[in-house]
Amino acid sequence: MIRTTPLIAVAAAALLAGCNQEDHTIVAGGPDTENPAADALKANGPVELPPSVAASKTYRCADNSVVHVDWLSDGKSANVRTDAGGTVQVVAPEAGQPMTGGTGYSVSGTADAASAKIATGGSAQSCKA
């Protein structure tokens, strides 16, 4: 027991002596060698995230069908979902204008309104939330 303590100290000193003692210089702002696509990302400019869902409403239409609309936060797009047709994204050129997309899908209205005019492949009809 008495002889093992000095041997452990000598072994620990030998291990530490093997560590690299060189100075390291880190240069910030230089070329990014870790990520080769970093220069391409900088050249493309800022990235715009897709709009989030601002409101989700379920509408009952004049023909007694049910339509689900996810109004998106950009104010000019929405996701329309029916049981038969799946989900279709409708988009307007500017906020406040009627949104169209897919084959015969359109939505006129806003997320705050209690009703909207919705077409899901046929003519537009009045639908209430």
Image (cartoon, rainbow, N blue to C red):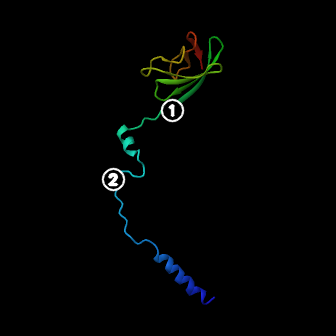
Q: Where residue 117 appears, x then y in whole percent?
A: 54, 14
Considering depth in this image, is 109 or 26 the residue closer to the camera?
26
Considering depth in this image, is 17 or 129 the residue closer to the camera?
17
Q: Residue furthest top?
A: 123
Q: Please give the residue where the numbered disc 2 appears in the rendered image.
A: 30
Identify whether 18 is placed above or below 90. below
Q: Residue at x 46, y 73 (%)?
A: 19
Quadrant of the image occupied by residue 87: top right
Mark 2 crowdedness (10 Å alpha carbons): few <14, some 14-19, many ≥20 = few
Q: Where residue 109 appears, x then y in whole percent?
A: 51, 18
Please tell me whether mark 2 sits on a helix, a strand or a loop.
Answer: loop
Name the residue type under label 1.
Answer: Ser
Q: Nearer the viewer, mark 1 or mark 2?
A: 2
Residue 93, labelled with which disc? none
Identify whether 23 is placed above or below 103. below
Q: Please give the residue where the numbered disc 1 appears in the rendered image.
A: 52
Left or right position of 129 against 110: right
User: Which quadrant, please, contains the N terminus?
Assistant: bottom right
Q: Residue furthest bottom?
A: 2
